[in-house]
Image (cartoon, rainbow, N blue to C red):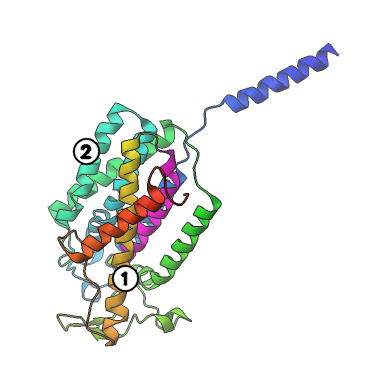
Amino acid sequence: MASKRGLVAREHESLAAIDARPQRPRLTEIWIVWALFGLATVAVFETYWRIPPQELWKVHNSGFVGGAGRALVFVGFSPALAALAVLPIVADRLDDRRANIVAVIAFALCATVGFVQTPSHLDPKWSNIWPVAGVAPAVLLTVWAARSGRPEAVRTTRAGDLTRIVLGLVTLLWATPYIAAELGFHLDGVPFFGWVFQTGKVAPEPGSGNLHATVHYGHHHGLDGLLLVVTALLLSRVLGGIRRPPLRVLTGVVLALMLVYGWTNMVNDLWIEQVVKRGWTSWQVPDVLFPSFSLAWAAMLVAAAAIYAAFFASRPLLRR
């Protein structure tokens, strides 16, 4: 009898020891974000290495140099914007003074993306190094937070996740021509998508009149829009786990603006290529790639504020 009691006691002790093991911070959503941008970077490198510059957009280099250069420019754009949302999350998880300092510096470097990108010239420049230099510590801080950061349960609802999935799938559908272009092919002849989207047909570029494929091979800011929307949807799942209120507010604001910015850039790209280039109208959705004092950006800020108040604020009207 005593031996049985001892066995039961040892079993309870072993179970307690298992429960007491430190939990690792999962950061699954952030790793998915980095994985998506990593895959996109590889696709950019391969496509711009393989395809001649005249079939791409605003680049002049070819081969390995062309691929590496365009990949560098890409990393200094939408991945840098995504890092602006990742950095407050990992800094909060680490709650370490050194991490805070690195995160602030990386955030400032990533924020230079609004000043160094030139969409009319997409070959690499020395100024592209600044936002890229911000992305690198953001990834390293993610590794640090995954190893030593505070575990935090995801605070969301089934309805919230279902909404994210639906929005993500709809956005993915409309980004199909840009995924194909990123991989270096058109959708002509592809069932359904080849009928919905005009991609390989040669058409004059609005403004210049130069003849080009409706959806040129290579990277589009419409794909940046997809990546940023998916980033915002994923990272919104961990917003409730940020314990420092200033960081939670900052992250929520960045995510709300990221959603609006991503969708608006997708609409801009799609409208030009699927509406204007078909000759249906000459009016274009305003270009909002970079911040400006304009009605379009004012409307985007209002929309972002509404999304933040409704979904990302500390007391949202609708639960996450």
Secondary structure under tag 2 reads: helix
Identity, as a three-letter code, of the amino acid under mark 1:
Val
- In the drawing, what numbered circle is on residue 105? 2
Where residue 180 appears, as percent x and y from the top left, is: 38, 71
Q: Residues within 10 Å of mark 2 (few under 14, many from 20)?
A: some
- The question of residue 300 being in magenta is answered with no
- In the drawing, what numbered circle is on residue 147? none
Q: Residue furthest bottom?
A: 279
- Lower sequence index among marks 2 and 1: 2
- In the drawing, what numbered circle is on residue 267? 1
Name the side, left or right, on which 21 lies relative to 113. right
Magenta span of residues: 222-242
Residue at point 16%, 64% (across, down): 294
Compared with residue 214, is residue 10 higher up or lower down, i.e. above or below? Answer: above
Q: Is residue 139 visible?
A: no
Where residue 86 appears, as percent x and y from the top left, is: 34, 45
Name the side, left or right, on which 145 lies relative to 268. right
Dominant SS of magenta comes to helix
Which mark lies nearer to you, 2 or 1? 1
Name the side, left or right, on which 228 lies relative to 291. right
Residue at point 22%, 59% (across, down): 69
Q: Is residue 143 visible?
A: yes
Q: Quadrant of residue 104?
A: top left
